[in-house]
Amino acid sequence: MRPDGRTVLGAALACTALVAAGCAVRHPTAAPPPADADKAPIARAAHPAEPFEGSFRAALEAAPAGTWFPALIDLTEQVDLPALGATLRSRGLSKEARRDAVVEALESVAEAQQSRLQPLLEGLSADGTLGSVRRLAIVNRLAIEAQAPAILAIAGRPEVRRVLPEWTSAGRGRAPLASPEPAGAAAPGERFRSWAIEAIGADRAWALGFDGAGVVVAALDTGVLAEHEQFAGRALEGERGWYDPVEGRERPWDSHGHGTTVLSQAVGGNPGGHVVGIAPRARWAAALANHRNHYSRVRMSLAADWVLRSARPDVLVNAWSHDEGACSDFDLAFINAWKAAEIFVVFPAGNGGPRPGSGEAPAQLTGAYPDGRGVFAVGGLEPGGMPGPESSRGPSPCGNREFPTLAAPGTGLPYAFPPSPSNYGNGDGTSLAAGIVAGAAALLLQARPSLSPDELEDLLVASARDVPPGGPDPLSGAGALDLVAAFRRLGIELPPARSAAPQSAP
């Protein structure tokens, strides 16, 4: 036990890959990675004269003895993801084999360098100044909790590139995205249907059997109420389906409601005439990344690593942002690793409109894998097809000339909401729009599983329906999400629209 009564994860130091309070269990792969996956191209940085971010060193040196700090330790060797991706593509590997090879390379590079710190970590743990150590691979990083002497000792090692303090939006006066509100339980026999279904053409895709079957959609958010009728029976099993880095609960739960809301837009099963989801037969996974709808560097690092190594989804919806800085690139390494591992990644543009330049990090960042493009960010549309007043506008101050990427329905939408399995709300927000795009991506991946994330991004942009004032603009980006046009570009003609009464999707 630590002096403050909390358990020291001493056993964690013996693990080669750590997440949360224990060792990660790797998801069995469909095919073994290439034999030379451990020879990944590496970007090496020198150990700097001052590895501490900002005033973190001063805070450590001024702290009373025995004070514990969470910290992130980034090491000098990181996988060169663009170079690795180009090599894997040149070999003509399948999408699944490329995913396996990227994860294997990230794990191999992290393990090789992190193991050199093992004797030091064991010694610091033995003298009581180092508590938990969690080893990450999505970035070659250690997430630790330690006293100042231990952090200073680790920082002096030549393997260390930078030492970062924890940062969280909690206590800063606002949640990072608009919060949903419940409307109550659905009345017996009540039927309702999201206007987004027809607006994007999902009903026409369903008519040909494209309902998300065989595709996995994951969410990093406030958790999820797995018992809600919209999600029943479609969670991935075991460690692939749920991760809680906050309390370590084994069963999914929602600390706020936002996660249940957004995931229902993507994969709601639409039972009993309560039609809210775009991909009603997709499987789902979720992590409690934003406890009570507040961002944390450490928590997001752990959840991001879980997505890459355990959940391994096809689509990832990130309905979160933070105000650490308009162009803070802390999360860009996660986004790049996910995309290199063949995960389509989508963010909401934000709810800061109608003011120009009202996006937030990381949605408005540029420099994303594989070619330095912008992060895929979604604005919100009203039922009439125009951008909602609160949807964040461009231009981005971060060099992303195409922010937002496109727009999707984001106003007046029904959604699942805690606390009961039949509870619903109705509201607005670009988080909802991001969930809808995630569901649309699942339908397209069901039709063409070989699409890479960048190919899918390009398809959605090229097929977007123009929204006035005409052409790409800082209100709706490339325009409105249009599944009919996207399927047509894949050579699949969807049937004509027909009048539809509220009912469950087929």
Image (spheres, helix red, strand yellow):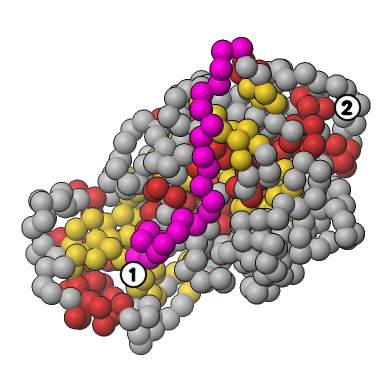
Horizontal and vertical percent position of residue 3: 8, 58
Q: Nearer the viewer, mark 2 or mark 1?
A: 2
Q: How far apart, in angstroms, are the residues tagged by discs 2 and 1? A: 53 Å
Q: Which range of residues does the magenta coloring cover?
A: 166-189
Main SS class of the magenta portion in the image:
loop
Q: Return the residue at label 2.
A: 497
Q: Residue at x 19, y 58 (%)?
A: 131
Q: Any magenta on residue 177? A: yes
- How many numbered tags mark residues here? 2
- Per the image, label 1 sits on a secondary structure element best described as strand
Mark 2 Cα shell of 10 Å, populated few (<14), some (14-19), many (≥20): few
Q: Which mark is residue 130?
A: none
- Residue 117 x %, y %: 27, 66
- Quarter of the view holding residue 296: bottom left
Q: Is residue 389 left or right of residue 207?
A: left
Quarter in which the C terminus is drawn: top right
